Image: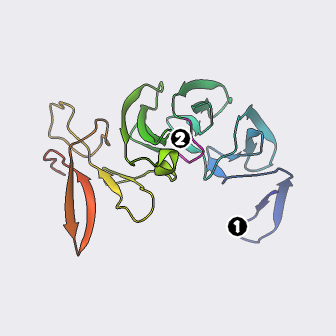
Amino acid sequence: MVRAYDAQTGEELWHKSYGIVGSLTAANKKLFVPADPNIVALDQATGNVVWSAPRDTFMYGATAVGNGLLFVPQGSGLKAFDLETGTLVWTAPASSLWSPAVANGVVYASNLNGEWAAFDARDGTELWSATIGLGCGGSCTNGTPAVANGVLYLSRPGQRPARVFSPKSLGETKPARIILVARTPCREERHSFGGQHFHVASPVSMPRS
């Protein structure tokens, strides 16, 4: 069941009966609902269906929004739908049940084969991929990537440390600012901080001016 309430009064505005596995995403005056077996776009104000598109598997977490597209993890691959029409724009080879993340025109997604991958948000072109775990298959990527301050954080299974990827300059003519996030894989190093071990990719010098 999906219910919408007035934020000021708590009055129920509308409700819809859906079987949901996953979380809701709100963007562009729409509410995107993982209503099995579809992904459904509802008008936030009325609850009316704007568009609906089929999915081939349930998912954990939520969809992601960026560049005018809705990114939906599926067993047949990561799919990008037009936010306004629900038209399928592209499909990328990343079969997953977990939420993707979008930052600076790049979509980061997990894969059931144990890889993490980065895709161009415009057309789904793969920019790079990385395998983190050792013999743990898709469980190595059970999680959602996070991007903050030009750094991409990826989870690891069990008590193993997280992986941290920093951006590299791609030949910009101006001093590099942190606007391109992990478009290319970086050399990984191991560091310690406060007695805790973590992995960090070695970035080039990037002025913050």
Residue 139 in the image, given as x and y percentages of width and height: 51, 50
Query: Of 39 and 47, which appears nearest the observer?
Result: 39
Query: Of 190 and 71, which appears nearest the observer?
Result: 190
Q: In this view, does 189 lie to the left or right of 136?
A: left
Magenta span dominant secondary structure: loop
Mark 1 vs mark 2, foreground winner is 2
Assess disc 1: are there few (<14), some (14-19) or many (≥20) residues with their C-alpha within 10 Å of its C-alpha. Answer: few
Hey, which residue is sitting farthest front in the picture?
A: 135
Q: Residue at x 24, y 41 (%)?
A: 186
Q: Residue at x 29, y 43 (%)?
A: 179
Residue contact at pointers 1 and 2, CB within 8 angstroms: no
Assess disc 2: are there few (<14), some (14-19) or many (≥20) residues with their C-alpha within 10 Å of its C-alpha. Answer: some
Q: In terms of secondary structure, where does tag 1 sit?
A: loop
Image quadrant in which you'd find residue 174: top left
Query: Of 63 and 92, which appears nearest the observer?
Result: 92
Residue 165 in the image, given as x and y percentages of width and height: 29, 48
Circle number at residue 107: none
Residue annotated with mark 2: 112
Residue 124 in the image, given as x and y percentages of width and height: 48, 27
Residue annotated with mark 1: 7
In magenta, the rendered stretch is: 95-99
Q: Is residue 138 left or right of residue 186?
A: right
Q: Which residue is drawn at 75% across and 34% down?
A: 51
How far is the residue under mark 1 from the one under mark 2? 38 Å
Q: Is residue 141 left or right of residue 153?
A: right
Q: In terms of secondary structure, where does tag 2 sit?
A: loop
Q: Compared to 74, does 141 lie above or below?
A: below
Give whichever of discs 1 and 2 has the lower sequence position. Answer: 1
